[in-house]
Image (cartoon, helix red, strand yellow):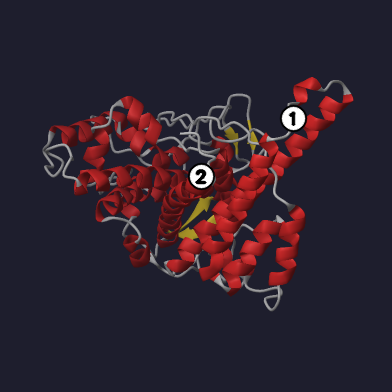
Amino acid sequence: MESIVSSSSSSVFSTNFPSKSSLSTQRRPGFISVSTNFRSPNGLIKHCPLISVPKQSQRSSRRRYSVVVRASSSGSGSSSSSSLGPLALESPVGKFLSEILISHPHLLPAAVDKQLEQLQTDRDAQKQIADPSASSGTDLVLYKRIAEVKANDRRKVLEEILYALVVQKFMDANVSLIPNVAPSSTDPSGRVDNWPVQEERHQQLHSSEAFEMIENHLALILGNRLGESNSVAQISKVRVGQVYAASVMYGYFLKRVDQRFQLEKNMKLLPPGLDREDSVLGKAVADDFKQSIGSDEEPKTHPEAPSWSGNPGGGFGHGMKASRLRNYVMSFDPESLQKYATIRSKEAVSIIEKHTEALFGRPDIVITPQGTIDSSKDELITISFGGLKRLVLEAVTFGSFLWDVESYVDSRYHFVMN
């Protein structure tokens, strides 16, 4: 069970990937293309499939949006759009929301609500269009093509609304998003992690129980190097990108289960024994983890870069702690756990893909017929373990915020299917 809860953390170290992914669209090469279908030599990873979300068919009014953009684009000019994160919003609505984030971020919720009202109006108007089944031949083909274009435009607007809301939550928390992962021209060592340390700010954005889970997530990734913030290593950029993407998904899952946990906690409905480290649930978690890594074997280290796990006494799982929330998750039946480990919308999946690709760039890799990655052209980056920790904390927080804004938008414009 621990393998499912922590699959996002250890999945990135697998050397054997399946050729088919349940998360990614096959059209987009990149870090997310390897998705949640990870397998690892030590058996820690299990598959968490995602549901597919049916395409919708509504359209934004480009004329109306473009007028608003022109009316609001005074003053900022080139602006500091890089401070909004690595992903540049491209649609007229996205550019409009970017301008608001730069000049008047407190007005973003009202602007988003207005855009969602327009999307709802467009969707209602689409429903009133006559059934095209009565048409035939060229008319039917043309109608379907127009509907497809409208659906793509609408989905892009919805994605960029979600992304803008995530960025605003980072701004409200006074936490900066990493602009890109690339060597700094001012650092002769070529390190990519010249970012401010913001661990305390990230910690304040999560409940105490959730942050215990995040600390365990970090322990699974960094092993006993967790406390060696200034140690530097050269690591595969693809691997780091996979760490980031998987951690976003982990943050999304974690916020989802923590929301239910906090509700039951306030209503005093939690299962008994969650506070006891020697509880049946706690022992089940420990036994499952030991069985996954092989309790009679030497501690596992990173299969490609020993510097990840450090000394022989460390390795993945070093520093894992008992956690109330972790024990609570272990009380879920398999069906509930599967549900909570699922990303609910295609739009959220697309945001994870696009954000990660904007942050790390598109990797020059090839998936072999055996389903493994041919990383002969993979780039190595120089990064400290403190920088890796900063990346993971941002990713988990990004996933948590993505859950929040997805729920907020869905309450005003329904697009989530479960």
Whether residue 167 sits left or right of residue 1 in the image: it is: right
Give coordinates of residue 109: x percent, y percent: 52, 62
Whether residue 329 sits left or right of residue 51 in the image: it is: left
Task: Write down the quadrant of residue 282 in the picture.
Answer: top left
Q: Secondary structure at mark 1?
A: loop
Q: Which amino acid, mark 2? A: Gln
Is residue 357 visible in the rendered image? The answer is no
What's the residue at 47%, 32% (across, down)?
38
Q: Nearer the viewer, mark 2 or mark 1?
A: 1
Q: Quadrant of the C terminus?
A: top left
Q: Badges 2 and 1: C-beta atoms under 8 Å apart?
A: no
Task: Write down the quadrant of residue 104 in the picture.
Answer: bottom right
Query: Which label number is shown at residue 130?
Result: 1
Whether residue 35 sits left or right of residue 124 in the image: it is: left
Task: Write down the quadrant of residue 101 in the picture.
Answer: bottom right
Is residue 159 visible in the rendered image? The answer is yes
- Residue at which label 2 appears: 242
Quick one: 132 or 56, which is closer to the camera? 132
